[in-house]
Amino acid sequence: MTPRLVLITGANRGIGREIALRMAGEGFQVVMACRNVSKALLVRDDIRARTGNALVDVLPLDLSSLASVRMFADTFRSTYRRLNMLINNAGILAFSKGCTSDGFEQTVGVNYLGPFLLTSLLLPLFPTGEDNRIINLTSMVWPLGTFDIERFLAYKGLKAYAVSKYAILLWTMYMADKLAVRDITVQAVHPGVVRTGIFSQRKWYDVLINTVMRPFLLSVEQGALPVLKLALEPQGIEKTARYFKGFKEQSLQAADVPPALIKVLMQRSADWVNTRM
Ligand SMILES: NC(=O)c1ccc[n+]([C@@H]2O[C@H](COP(=O)([O-])OP(=O)(O)OC[C@H]3O[C@@H](n4cnc5c(N)ncnc54)[C@H](OP(=O)(O)O)[C@@H]3O)[C@@H](O)[C@H]2O)c1
């Protein structure tokens, strides 16, 4: 029997690496989409050795470049031809200013616009009538991410992170509505506050952040668990909840995810990355 295929972005470290390890252990064919291929290959070898699952591959993907996303999607399509699960995990939290190669603010570009394009390009690969899932990593800070659509690409630092995670939530709502008829569940999850490299800014105050936060942080193994629950547990498409904070379903009000805002964000996002949703 052909194993189910899961694609995980940012699978070379942090929560994504743990998810890849556990999904390989569950017998999935795993494709790790990573920008640092040499590091990812070492992780791939480790996962293969620890799980005995040889069907773990690495493909290069840099979410800060729409050209890279398009190239990745072409290679993925011609190599695998199908996809059962997409876990949009890769993300950054950058305090400093920076731009993607397409000129977008880096955090919004990497966390939201890159995955938005990637997902739209891969959607045709989900087979109808099967158990298909898309899981997006968001953050509980999303309520701080309210934005003016005209300024969407201009926010910086922590605000940009929150905006990117709110945009992921709005996009998740949109896709969940649209893709149910195609047998694809779409969910967003906050994994918890987890001890990974995401807080590191390569600055002198890293030590301070790590020391202060360390006792309050979950391990990577713990942080992966809410994602793995959504990935592995059986679920009916009609009853699927859309946003989880850790293991807990959260009900969202229309004021949290206004349909008019979703509509305008989807239209603009499709224009920015030059795709159709
Ligand atoms: N840790 C937390 O407390 C926490 C809380 C809420 C939400 N989250 C979310 O959980 C997800 C995973 O975070 P984490 O804590 O595991 O972070 P992490 O340890 O810093 O790992 C981030 C992953 O994303 C990859 N990545 C970064 N920029 C990329 C790009 N341009 N193209 C492709 N891949 C890129 C990294 O690759 P490189 O190794 O090449 O940099 C790495 O594999 C993120 O979406 C994050 O926002 C985390």
Image (cartoon, helix red, strand yellow):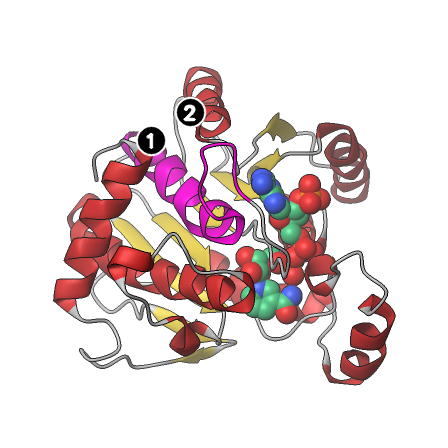
Circle 2 SS class:
helix
Relative depth, front residue between 148 and 252: 148
Residue 231: image tag: none
Determine whether, in the image, residue 62 is placed left or right of residue 123.
right
- Amino acid under label 2? Arg
Q: Does 158 sit above or below residue 51?
A: below
Q: Position of residue 196 (x, y in %)?
A: 73, 62
Q: Position of residue 229 (x, y in %)?
A: 51, 65
Asked if residue 234 can be seen in this view, the reply is no
Rendering coords of residue 45 (x, y %): 79, 33
| Left or right, residue 82 beside residue 17 | left
C-alpha gap between disc 2 and disc 1: 8 Å
Magenta segment: 99-124
**Which residue does the numbered mark 1 point to in the structure image?**
121
Location of residue 57 in the rendering, given as x and y in whole percent from the top left corner: 64, 29
Report crowding for label 2: few under 14, some 14 to 19, many 20 or more residues within 10 A (C-alpha).
Answer: some
Which quadrant, please, contains the C terminus?
Answer: top left
Q: Residue at x 29, y 67 (%)?
A: 240
Q: Among all residues in the image, which is located at the extreme top?
A: 78
Q: Is residue 100 magenta?
A: yes
Residue at image point 42% right, 77% down: 144
Determine whether the residue tagged by mark 1 lies in a helix, strand or loop. helix
State left or right for residue 26 relative to residue 40. left
Q: How many marks?
A: 2
Which secondary structure is most common in the magenta stretch? helix
Give the left or right position of residue 106, taking residue 143 as reference: right
Residue identifier under label 2: 70
Circles 2 and 1, Cβ within 8 Å, touching? The answer is yes
Q: Nearer the viewer, residue 127 or 95?
A: 95
Question: Can you say whether 69 is above or below 71 in the image?
Answer: below
